[in-house]
Amino acid sequence: MAYPSPHLSISRRILGALATGASIALLAHVTTVFAFFVSAGANPETFASLARFFQNGTALTFVLLSLAAALEAFRRWYIALPVGLAVAVVSSYLGTLLAVLGEGAALDANTTDYLAASLIGPNLVFIVACGIFAATVGVAVWRAIAGAPGEDSERRIALVRLPASTLADGEVTHIERSAVDPERADRQWESYVAVLAEHGWDVMEVPVAEGLADSVFVEDTVMTFDDTAVIGIAGTESRRGETEAVEAMVRGLRLHVEHIEAPGTLEGGDVLTVGRTVYVGSSGRTNAEGIRQLRRIVQPLGFEVVAVPVTKVLHLKTAVSALPDGTVIGYAPNVDEPSLFHRFLSVPEVEGSAVVPLDDATVLVSSAAPGTAALIESLGYTVVTAEISEFEKLEGGVTCLSARIR
């Protein structure tokens, strides 16, 4: 099955890198020359000599910053700032060295001392200017040309994974096991994927993981927060091999990757993001250490983590999910503490607890939850249904069959 790919083209990467490097280097050069020109009394005779003094460092800065931009160092300001400073230090030192050697000086102790002193002398303005422009103009130019994922409000990517032939052997914890029809499951999966594609999602298929029965529930492997992807650790040993191919996929999407480390466990089915609030289920699959690690990762990104007890179902999103307006919905008997949510609305069916907002006005609901579909429609939303009965037999829902990146 073929789907569109949102990977960055080589031409855009090269153009973005060159434009980013050029804009930072040129602005830093002009700012530095102008600053010294004014401080020297705006004497026209000094302008040309100042421009020559900084030209080598500026040229090296352009080259090195362009390389850094090609490696996507300018997707976030707090990475761009130290990169800009480091590049400016190296370029200033080497540029001044070339100028000194060009004037016939020997590379001796006096020259070395002069080069070191220049970094906190005439080159300091250039270094500081590079850092400032890297974190501001450089990031803006890179995003404008290359399209950084964190700034693309229209991005809608869905990672999906074809069911393994061993699907029927998947883990079952809170419900009685019943027979799964693999062929019917495949047809239902194809219909589910088609719904995502029809509603504007760029669907990307992670390679099938034969032998990993639960791998179709791809949402459990990765969670995204702006342009950061967090790779989880499954709470059950049988699922530990699912993340490698998913991580390769998100790295190809130019997302910054963080990992939950053992002994922490964290599954995506326990993570519900509503605006800048991240509800995390403390369940049989996600432990306290996993929640602590997630909090340390996402709080600097501007997200608040709220831990929620989950004792009656497999995952938090087995019990609750959210509508496009942020209202949390769920089947009340399965929700431990509904008061922890900012707004909570009870739905009439267990299968209606998990819904997927396809856009701001459209919601995907399991066909096994007609009462929930009617309730959501009464709130002014368009409801699309999908039959996923074979996955519901394995405690799955419409949320866990895809990892959605926005």
Image (tube, helix red, strand yellow):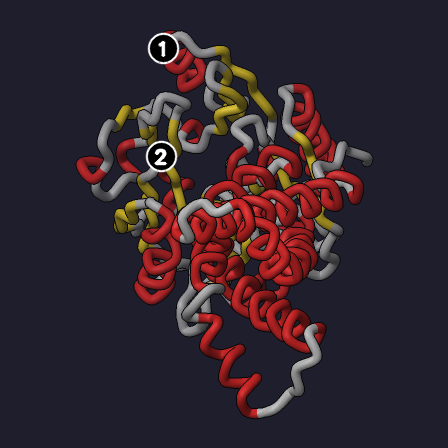
Nearer to the camera, 141 or 9: 141
Residue 28 seen in the figure: yes
Q: Residues within 10 Å of mark 1 (few under 14, many from 20)?
A: few
Q: Which residue occupies the extreme left position in the image?
A: 339
Q: Tell me the amino acid under the disc marked 2.
A: Val
Image spot of residue 15 (x, y percent): 73, 41
User: At x 57% / y 84%, what residue is drawn?
Assistant: 111
Q: Is residue 99 above or below residue 7?
A: below
Report how far apart the C-alphas of labels 1 and 2 lie in the structure: 18 Å
Q: Front-most of 266 and 316? A: 266
Which label was assigned to residue 209?
none
Per the image, the residue denoted by label 2 is 274
Within the image, what quadrant is residue 344 found in?
top left
Q: Name the residue under label 1.
A: 379
Q: Left or right: 340 with respect to 262?
A: left
Residue found 61% across the figure and 91% down from its top: 108
The outermost residue toward the bottom is: 109
Tell me what residue is drawn at x 69 percent, y 34 percent: 203
- Amino acid type at mark 1: Leu
